[in-house]
Structures are given as structure tokens and as C-alpha cells.
Image: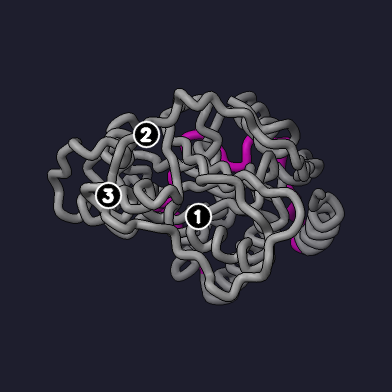
């Protein structure tokens, strides 16, 4: 599946509008956003009300492209979306920069791959949680239809950038959810609190909530599930605090989130493994990449069989 036709039509309409004002989409950018540009530090003049509405309409178009599978522009669109209330001149320039990037990178396929991933089981730590969460179990719909067909495997990558916003110092959570080797959900959102660690428990807790929701829906659709959901993140402390019963939880707000995660582990809803940062596919949803790294990451997520 791809959004090529939609992208072409949007670019065509946009260029007709720009031509009327004697403007055009500039250059052939290799990245969705100019290098080292931080929208939160922008002090260019504010757009007037008409220009702000124009900005919002283009952000809406870009959001729809993300829904259609253009994961390569997700973090850029997400960051620029936070300025819908008071967009600035350079914010609008960056939106046009994204469209210029799409014009010259219109072909991106989302591959529906049914293959299971043969993970190395030694990656996942297992402990006895019986004494900590007695009776913990996954929420299963009592009125779910009888499952039919082949069971599906759920694989999830989780990431959070460290204080990505230079003004608020808040991080962005990124979650990429696969069924077998097919990406079906991509999530990106600015965290509502400032985290002192590079990852914290926020992103993992949100991932658990999403996984539980998707598994519940799949069961209501009559889709059989294979075992637990496999979660991958690169932060060792998060893996330890989530999977080792004897690890100490020091911060109150972190401990509440970790108890949510630990209970999911005890209920065999999820199992968690640590991967290297370069192998964490959710990185694409939380931070900008260089042109070569962006192309490589997009090809790994959208165009080839899932593997580490």
C-alpha cells in the first residue's frame, strides 16, 4: 500500500496555489525538516489569522499522509502541529519544506508481510511474579467470538527522546506496533511531564495500554493471538525495572507506571527485551535522522521483513 497518488495530487494543488503568488516549492531536500532547526526556538513573526488557517489546513493534510503510512515525516509533523495556536513565518516555511521533500520522495510502500519473526528467546528475561501480583491476568472479553484462522504475533518497538523540546525539556514518546512483520500502528506524542531520565516509564506504560487495547479488539474480531506481545526498547534500566522483581523503584510517579508495566508482565500480556539504539525502529518516531540514516530506517520499517 502507498500514498503516492494522494501525495501527487496534494503537491499539484499546492503548486498551483503557490504559482498564483509567484512562489514555488524550493529545492530537492533530502530530509523532511532542515538540519538543526528547532521550531520551539523560532522567533520569526507570527502569522496573521488567514495565514494561520492556511498553516492549519496544511498540517491536517500532512497528518493524513502520516495515517496513510508516511512514517518518515511523523516526528516533523508532530512537532509542527504543536504550534497550531500561534504559528510563525518560519514554521510555515518548514511545512512547505516537508511538501518539497514529499515531491521528490513520493514513493513509499507499506508492505503487508504475514511472516512470523523468530526472535532469540534469550533476549527476554523471565521471573516468577506470583508473590508480587497474585492473580494477575490479561483482560479477555467474555463475549468474544470463537477465533478463526492463523494466530498473529505482536511485536512492539518503544522509544522516547531525551528532553527533545529545547524550551520545555519534555520528551516525545514513539511507539511502532507490528502484527507479524506488518506495521499497523504508529504513535507519537509529546509527554505531559518532564522526565529526568532518558526514557522513564511513561513511554513503556503508554505502550502497554495500546497493546492491551489492540489485543482486546483483535479478540473481538475473532483473531487468535500467539503468546505475549514482544516489546523492544534500548534503555537497560527500563527493562530491569519492568522485568526484575527485586529492582528498586525510587520515584513515586515512576513507580506507579512501573507497577502497571510489571503487572502486565506478570499477566503474560507482554515480555520485554533490550535492543541497541540503532536497532530500535521506534527511533524514527522521536528524533530527526540524517538523509542516509532516514532512508535506511524507512526501508527497514516499510519495505522489508522485520528483523533485528
> Is residue 19 in sight in this rendering?
no
Q: Which residue corresponds to mark 1? A: 211
Task: Judge whether 62 appears above or below 283 on screen.
Answer: below
Q: Is residue 38 left or right of residue 219?
A: left
Quadrant hosting residue 18: bottom right
Q: Which residue corresponds to mark 3? A: 258
| Residue contact between numbered discs 1 and 3, judged by CB atoms under 8 Å | no
The residue positioned 68% from the left and 49% from the top of the image is: 151
Question: At numbered mark 2, what does the secondary structure look like: helix, strand or loop?
Answer: loop
Q: Is residue 274 left or right of residue 101?
A: left
| Residue contact between numbered discs 1 and 2, judged by CB atoms under 8 Å | no
Circle 3 crowding by C-alpha within 10 Å: few under 14, some 14–19, many from 20: many
The residue positioned 22% from the left and 43% from the top of the image is: 196
Q: Nearer the viewer, mark 3 or mark 2?
A: 2
Which residues lie in the magenta part? 20-47
Instruction: Choose the circle earlier in sequence order: 3 or 2.
Output: 2
Circle 1 crowding by C-alpha within 10 Å: few under 14, some 14–19, many from 20: many
Q: Which mark is residue 94?
A: none
Q: Which residue corresponds to mark 2? A: 126
The residue positioned 61% from the left and 63% from the top of the image is: 219
Judge by depth and name the residue closer to the eye, 181 or 28.
181
Residue 112: horizontal and vertical position, in percent? 77, 45
**Gap in angstroms between the C-alphas marked 3 and 2:** 16 Å
| Residue contact between numbered discs 3 and 2, judged by CB atoms under 8 Å | no
Q: Is residue 15 left or right of residue 271?
A: right
Question: At numbered mark 1, what does the secondary structure look like: helix, strand or loop?
Answer: helix
- Magenta segment includes 264: no
> Is residue 162 in sight in this rendering?
yes
Circle 2 crowding by C-alpha within 10 Å: few under 14, some 14–19, many from 20: some
Amino acid at each position: 500500500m502507498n500514498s503516492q497518488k494522494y501525495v501527487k495530487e496534494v503537491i499539484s494543488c499546492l503548486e498551483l496555489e503557490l504559482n498564483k503568488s509567484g512562489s514555488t516549492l524550493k529545492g530537492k531536500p533530502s530530509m523532511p525538516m532542515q538540519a538543526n532547526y528547532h521550531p520551539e526556538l523560532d522567533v520569526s513573526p507570527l502569522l496573521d489569522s488567514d495565514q494561520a488557517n492556511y498553516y492549519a489546513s496544511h498540517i491536517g493534510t500532512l497528518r493524513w499522509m502520516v495515517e496513510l503510512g508516511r512514517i518518515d515525516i511523523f516526528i516533523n509533523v508532530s512537532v509542527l502541529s504543536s504550534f497550531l495556536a500561534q504559528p510563525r513565518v518560519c514554521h510555515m516555511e518548514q511545512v512547505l519544506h516537508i511538501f518539497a521533500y514529499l515531491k521528490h520522495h513520493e514513493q513509499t510502500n507499506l508492505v503487508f508481510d504475514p511472516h512470523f519473526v523468530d526472535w532469540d528467546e534469550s533476549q527476554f528475561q523471565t521471573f516468577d511474579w506470583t508473590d508480587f501480583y497474585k492473580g494477575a491476568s490479561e483482560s479477555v472479553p467474555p463475549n468474544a467470538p470463537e477465533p478463526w484462522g492463523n494466530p498473529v504475533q505482536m511485536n512492539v518497538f518503544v522509544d522516547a527522546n531525551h528532553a527533545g523540546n529545547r524550551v520545555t525539556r519534555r520528551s516525545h514518546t514513539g511507539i511502532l506496533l507490528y502484527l507479524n512483520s506488518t506495521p499497523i500502528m504508529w504513535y507519537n506524542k509529546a509527554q505531559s511531564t518532564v522526565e529526568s531520565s532518558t526514557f522513564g516509564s511513561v513511554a513503556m506504560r503508554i505502550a502497554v495500554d495500546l497493546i492491551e487495547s489492540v489485543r482486546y479488539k483483535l479478540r473481538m474480531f475473532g483473531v487468535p493471538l500467539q503468546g505475549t506481545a514482544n516489546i523492544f526498547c534500548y534503555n537497560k534500566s527500563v527493562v530491569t525495572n519492568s522485568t526484575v522483581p527485586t529492582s528498586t523503584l525510587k520515584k513515586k510517579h515512576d513507580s506507579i507506571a512501573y507497577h502497571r508495566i510489571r503487572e502486565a508482565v506478570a499477566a503474560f500480556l507482554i515480555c520485554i527485551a533490550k535492543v541497541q539504539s540503532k536497532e530500535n525502529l521506534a527511533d524514527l518516531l522521536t528524533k530527526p535522522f540524517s538523509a542516509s540514516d532516514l532512508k535506511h530506517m524507512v526501508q527497514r520499517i516499510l519495505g522489508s521483513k522485520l528483523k533485528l
